[in-house]
């Protein structure tokens, strides 16, 4: 139990807000798969260790731009302005694209297996655990603000575990992502669709990183 608690706290604790996405999965597992008394002890220990991360997180926020008030103002901005729940416009729709496009590109070879497994085995508890991992974070990223595609790494493990039924699928997925990283380059353009590709996919390729393409995106037509 102590080992499991520490592993979870290390995985979820450094980013407390992201760690909250794992609560439905953790709660479901505890109250359906292990004895109630052990579940309460486990959740209590997890809560204590995860809350401990708020101390270094708070200290780090104090050194952020604007300090803690600036962080809180930014959170309110995300909730009241940059969420699609506040209205459908170019900015809020761009936020949806920032989630969906990288997800489709990165896991293109895995998503068919993920979908099939989720549909056909949705009653299997391991599949349910992965869905409880993926769905809360996905809903947040769609309905709230996600600044960059690397946030999707929070969901990568669950997607791969849910979709990988054989080593062949894993090899194909690795080859696909390696090809994108090594061979694809950003495309200079003032067209909205091309810039969407550049901002959400192109700037994470080897060429873009090597040539510092990301800072140069400010010179391209903005999407705001």
Image (spheres, helix red, strand yellow):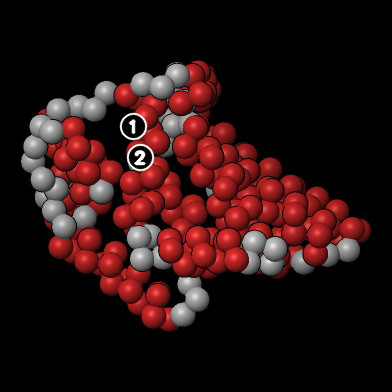
Residue 173: x, y in percent? 35, 69
Q: Which residue is at a point 14% across and 37% down the rendered structure image?
A: 216
Q: Which mark is residue 94?
A: 1
Q: Is residue 216 left or right of residue 33?
A: left
Q: Is residue 64 left or right of residue 215?
A: right
Residue 162: x, y in percent? 54, 65
- Which residue extends farthest bottom? 167
Q: Quadrant where the N terminus lies?
A: bottom right
Q: Judge whether 42 appears above or below 148 on screen.
A: below
Indicate the secondary structure of the residue bearing disc 1. Answer: helix
Indicate the secondary structure of the residue bearing disc 2. Answer: helix
Q: Which residue is at a point 47% across and 39% down the rendered structure image?
A: 141
The one nearer the camera, 50 or 155, is: 155
Q: Judge whether 124 appears above or below 48 on screen.
A: below
The one nearer the camera, 153 or 180, is: 180
Q: Which residue is at a point 44% across and 54% down the rendered structure image?
A: 153
Q: Which residue is at a point 37% across and 29% down the rendered structure image?
A: 93
Labels 2 and 1 touching (C-beta < 8 A):
yes
Q: Judge whether 96 appears above or below 153 on screen.
A: above
Residue 55: x, y in percent? 62, 39
Q: Is residue 17 left or right of residue 193?
A: right
Badge 2 density bin: few <14, some 14–19, many ≥20, Cα 10 Å: many
Distance from Cα at disc 2 to Cα at disc 1:
6 Å
Q: Is residue 17 visible?
A: yes
Q: Is residue 132 left or right of residue 78?
A: right
Instruction: Give the residue number, with chain letter if any, for mark 2.
Output: 98
Badge 1 density bin: few <14, some 14–19, many ≥20, Cα 10 Å: many
- Which residue extends farthest front? 120
């Amino acid at each position: 139990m102590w080992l499991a608690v520490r592993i979870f706290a290390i995985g979820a604790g450094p980013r407390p807000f992201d760690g909250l996405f794992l609560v439905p999965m953790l709660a479901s597992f505890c109250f359906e798969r292990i004895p109630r008394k052990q579940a309460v002890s486990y959740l209590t220990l997890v809560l204590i260790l995860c809350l401990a991360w708020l101390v270094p997180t708070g200290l780090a926020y104090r050194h952020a731009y604007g300090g803690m008030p600036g962080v809180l103002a930014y959170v309110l901005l995300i909730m009241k302005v940059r969420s699609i729940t506040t209205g459908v416009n170019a900015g809020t729709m761009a936020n949806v694209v920032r989630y969906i496009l990288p997800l489709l590109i990165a896991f293109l070879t895995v998503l068919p297996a993920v979908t099939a497994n989720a549909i056909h085995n949705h009653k299997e508890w391991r599949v349910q655990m992965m869905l409880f991992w993926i769905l809360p974070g996905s809903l947040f990223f769609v309905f709230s603000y996600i600044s960059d595609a690397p946030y999707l790494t929070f969901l990568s493990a669950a997607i791969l575990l849910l979709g990988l039924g054989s080593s062949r699928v894993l090899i194909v997925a690795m080859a696909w992502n390696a090809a994108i990283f090594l061979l694809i380059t950003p495309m200079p353009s003032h067209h909205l669709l091309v810039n969407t590709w550049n901002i959400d996919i192109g700037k994470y390729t080897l060429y873009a990183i090597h040539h510092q393409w990301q800072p140069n995106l400010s010179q391209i037509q903005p999407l705001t």
